[in-house]
Image (cartoon, rainbow, N blue to C red):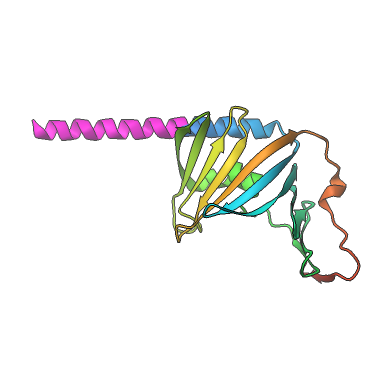
Amino acid sequence: MMKKIIITAFLVFISLMSFAQSDATSILRELQNKYNTISDLSVDYTQKANGKVILTGKIFFKKENKYRIENKNQIIGSDGISAWNFNASQKKYIITNYDAENNSIYSINYLVYQLPNECLLSVRSDGNHRVLELTPKSTNLQFSRIDLWINSDKLIQKISFKDLNNSTTEINLSNYKLNQKISDSLFSFNPPEGTKVIDLR
């Protein structure tokens, strides 16, 4: 009798896990379908480390691989061919070749399309948001979990990143503006006079 109870409990557990995985896959598909409709976007961000605000700024993205991330002292961007990083306080401008495997948590392509393939997925509810939980399948990734809060518009509202030392970084996204026909010129940069230029291409 006890053996039957254990087997039944195990089968119920497996069934619930399969359902949760299926539900998470459905949420991911909805998220990807939404971003498939977006040709460009801008969004404000606030970054916190262990609950303390450390950065605020703005993110711009344009398909296929153009992005620009601004904060008070730094601007990072790419035109899809070259990637660049301007540090205002150091008066330094570094240029490299664009890396299609860019695995920054600020990268929409990475978060929405690449990373989920390398993770186990689950989902939970948090108020009006669905939270997509991504746990690495292997030890190759430099985090223990990433959570994506997805709002009713199927947009990412918050990102929580827990590293291998259990330190948590949180990025809140607000004031989305979609499909504005952002000019390509925004994704190139001419550093001001007196800037040290380091070209690593």
Q: Is residue 180 above or below residue 81?
A: above
The residue segment tinted magenta is 1-23
- Tell me, yes or no, if residue 17 can be seen here: yes
Q: Residue furthest left?
A: 1
Q: Residue furthest right?
A: 193
- Quarter occupied by residue 39: top right
- Tell me, yes or no, if residue 101 can be seen here: no
> Considering the image in quadrants, where does the N terminus appear?
top left
Q: Residue at x 61, y 30 (%)?
A: 154
> Considering the image in quadrants, where does the C terminus appear?
bottom right
The question of residue 123 being in magenta is answered with: no
- Residue 120 location (% of width, % of height): 44, 44
Left/right of residue 87 with respect to residue 147 in the rendered view: right
- The secondary structure that dominates the magenta segment is helix
Left/right of residue 198 with respect to residue 44 in the rendered view: right
- Residue 102 location (% of width, % of height): 65, 55
- Quarter occupied by residue 8: top left
- Residue 136 location (% of width, % of height): 46, 50
Q: Residue at x 84, y 54 (%)?
A: 188
Q: Is residue 157 above or below residue 77?
A: above
Q: Residue at x 91, y 67 (%)?
A: 193
Q: How many marks?
A: 0
The question of residue 21 being in magenta is answered with: yes
- Residue 196 location (% of width, % of height): 83, 72
Q: Residue at x 88, y 59 (%)?
A: 190
